[in-house]
Image (cartoon, rainbow, N blue to C red):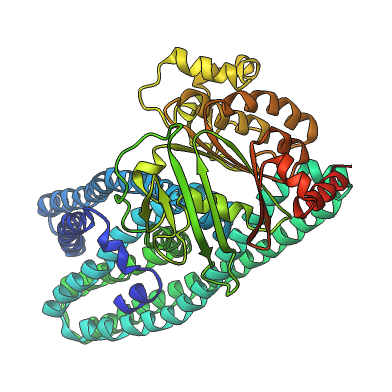
Amino acid sequence: MQVWGSVTLIDKRLFDLPGMRRYVMILGVLVFIQAVAIIVQARYLSIAIVNLWHLQPISSIVVPTCIFAVAFLCRHLLTVWQNRVLFPFVEKTSGDMRESLMAKIFRLGPAEIDKRGTGNIVTMALEGIDQVQTYLMLVIIKMLDMSITPWLILIYILFIRWEQAIFLFIIFPVIILFMVILGLAAQSKADRQYEGYQHLSNHFVDTLRGLSTLKQLGLSKRYANNVYSVSESYRKETMSTLRIALTSTFALDFFTTLSIAVVAVFLGFDLMDGKVMLLPALTILVLAPEYFLPIRNFANDYHATLNGKNAMTAVLDVLNQPEMKQREELPDFKWDQDSKLELDHVNYTYPEVKRPALNDISVTIKGMKKIGIIGASGSGKSTLINLIGGFLSPDKANQVAINGQRLPHLDQAAWQQNFLYIPQNPYLFHATLADNISFYVNDATDQSIKDAAERAGLTRWIKSLPDGLETMIGEGARTVSGGQAQRIALARAFLDTDRKVLLFDEPTAHLDIETEAALKKDILPVFNDHLVFFATHRLHWIGEMDYVLVMDHGRLVEQGTPDELAAKNGDYVKLRSEMEASDL
């Protein structure tokens, strides 16, 4: 029994969750009392039936019936009690896990999202955490029930009649062994199903993001067929998993029913031969189904439990990702006109590839400037933004410096208090629109949030919402378009006037030209009095920049003002020509 659970359904990290061991002990005591109530219930039900069989007066069954009723009521009240004890813990644990997951992803940065896929992260944060909640509610109580109840019943039967106790003891591991085989097959299927679900999520989210572009290129129908193909593959994996699960349930029901029948047959023979009295025989027969009930209950929820286990494993894998150390090397400071950021021959190589994504990057930025980062796809623009944001660490320490102080990396708490990061797809939390806008500012007033929203061009849209700024968005709530999401991120920048560094990672890449043009009018004012890093492949943004970094295959091939680079007639001019051609 424990082998089956440990092989397929128990992640050892489950017991490392805060408070888990305490609740396991409390539930263990409740399950033990419940098992005693089951035995008492079976014993006094048998006494009442035997007294009736022997034509005893009705008064002789009053006390046994009352005891049976109390034990029966106690048994089911304990089930309710177990759930009431566990649910607040599970709800808090899953809620904390969701918050920890979001915070962890925020600290790990965009590189982690790129590695796992946006759809996978969304699935993990929404359906995944819900599955974890189901898993915790089911697996703890059912595993304790399997670990305690059958053995107490077996010990009690052993004192009544050892022959039946030995038979039940032998048949139980046989059933478990058979279920281990089916359980491993089901786990293998469930793993492939979960991978298929992640693939479907990533594929669907990516297709949804690029839908406007696909329609413009006339490729929407082709990608609709791709979505259908991926979803059909997921359906087949799901049905295959369900077939294994149904086979497992049928086999378990068959073996347990057959075992109870064997016990009944041999008890009947012994009754006819006078080797056993009716009361102990009936007591054993009533307890035999209870002996197998925990494993049957467990099997009924096996598929849901297995999905939850896979989801929790995925979440814990993210939560256990190593983070950068030495995050307090930089003292508190505020970026101003005299501040200076230096990258000194910086290299960065992604763990899964050998070729450096950034190669020998050297640049010095001082004060409030608008820095454009341009280059073809794959040139290293996003990697450079992520490194400046501290989401990635250089291959060697002390290749970056702020105000002359050499640092192992830029994942410094003081540095991150100075910048806002605005990616292609800003993350929106499951909260009100006002809470999303005030993400970086804990003490923002209602008026300041309204002002920031107005400056970001959100006022007309907010007026159309049923609850205005109190409308719930993000994570399964009201949907938000790409342009609206960018404006919410922009409102965050308008609201937090203390953060003087802005990191834009191609924020308009997936928007159509009209939406981008309208958004640009609202973005430009926020550039004032800020250090801005703006990675883009759109030509019209370059004219707004004070300084341009030209990237090519991870190298910084040119840098300077737009006029200086134009005069060189080098990589910058060549890239501008390519961008002009692509814009046409």
The quarter holding residue 478 reads top right
Q: Is residue 461 left or right of residue 321?
A: right
Give the mark count.
0
Image coordinates of residue 320 in percent, x first then y, are 37, 61
Image coordinates of residue 143 in percent, x first then y, are 30, 65
Q: Is residue 520 above or below residue 403?
A: above
- Please name whichever residue, 123 or 280, is drawn nearer the observer in this view of the structure: 123
Q: Is residue 226 left or right of residue 453?
A: right
The quarter holding residue 174 reads bottom left
Q: Is residue 436 above or below residue 281?
A: above
- Please name whichever residue, 290 or 425, is drawn nearer the observer in this view of the structure: 425
- The reply to whether residue 246 is in sight is no
- The reply to whether residue 201 is in sight is yes
Q: Quadrant of the N terminus?
A: bottom left
Q: Is residue 135 above or below residue 480?
A: below
Image coordinates of residue 220 in percent, x first then y, are 83, 48
Q: Is residue 516 above or below residue 457?
A: below
Q: Residue at x 26, y 72 (%)?
A: 285
Q: Is residue 273 left or right of residue 194?
A: left
Image coordinates of residue 317 in percent, x first then y, are 42, 63
Q: Quadrant of the C terminus?
A: top right
